[in-house]
Amino acid sequence: MLAENLIAQELVQHTSLVLVDGGDRLEPGSPRGNRWRHLDEAMGNNEELLSVVRTVVGNMDSEIETQIRECEARLYTAMSTSDVSELDVLIADDLLFAGPTGELATKAMDLDLHRTGGTQFHEFVPKELEIRVWSEHFVLALAQIFLSGTYLGNAFAGDYRYMRVWRRGKSGWQIVGGSVTAMV
């Protein structure tokens, strides 16, 4: 079984196969939907080895989900305390984020709002977090958070839905895109 695990890890990490789900091209190793068709064919329908590959990929997804949950927790703390240095680590330089009124913000704009007190949170209560691992480099996180505070001098309070895209690069996991909207 150890040899099969090593083979499965090699297949998942180094295969050049493109897995297919409904005609979409997907990254090798993704356990979602019907994406195993070509991998199954390439392995000669070896169910035992395919089962090992699915287990290895599922474990990788679980590890990535844990990492993102930890990043989200760090982000919540940094946002609620306006910890600009931690936000700088967690947010990618090429961030593009849509705010609650539809305005687009960059990393520099977001950090400046925290640095100057333009964004201040008085209450920050996470309610739920859904995570979708797209690949070993991209993850979607959807969070519902009760917030109260001020934004550019205007008070706000209520439940908000954050959508964030996390990318793993040279600097680790960072947010590259997202949006926030008030829940009504």
Image (tube, helix red, strand yellow):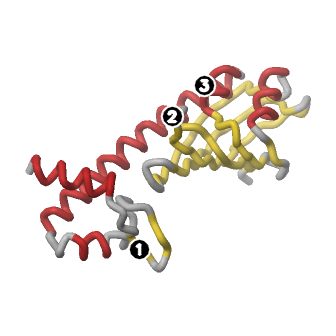
Residue at image coords 18%, 54%:
7
The residue positioned farthest toward the bottom in the image shown: 23
Label 1: state its secondary structure: strand
- Which residue in the protein does label 2 denote? 172
Q: How many marks?
A: 3
Mark 3, mark 2: which one is toward the viewer?
A: 2
Left or right of 14 in this view: 82: right
For the C terminus, the quadrant is bottom right
131 or 52: nearer the eye? 52
Residue 16 is situated, as x and y percent measured from the top left of the image, at: 36, 63
Residue 25 is situated, as x and y percent measured from the top left of the image, at: 48, 71
Residue at image coords 74%, 50%:
181
Nearest to N terminus: mark 1 or mark 2? 1
Residue count near mark 3 (Cα–Cα under 10 Å), binned few <14, some 14–19, many ≥20: some
9 or 68: nearer the eye? 9
Circle 1: residue type: Val
Residue count near mark 1 (Cα–Cα under 10 Å), binned few <14, some 14–19, many ≥20: some
Mark 1, mark 3: which one is toward the viewer?
A: 1
Residue at image coords 38%, 60%:
30
Image-quadrant location for residue 117: top right
Query: Is mark 1 in CB contact (under 8 Å) with mark 2?
Result: no
Left or right of 136 in this view: 87: right
CA distance for labels 1 and 3: 39 Å
- Which residue in the protein does label 3 denote? 77
From what the image shows, is residue 4 above or below residue 88? below
Label 3: state its secondary structure: helix
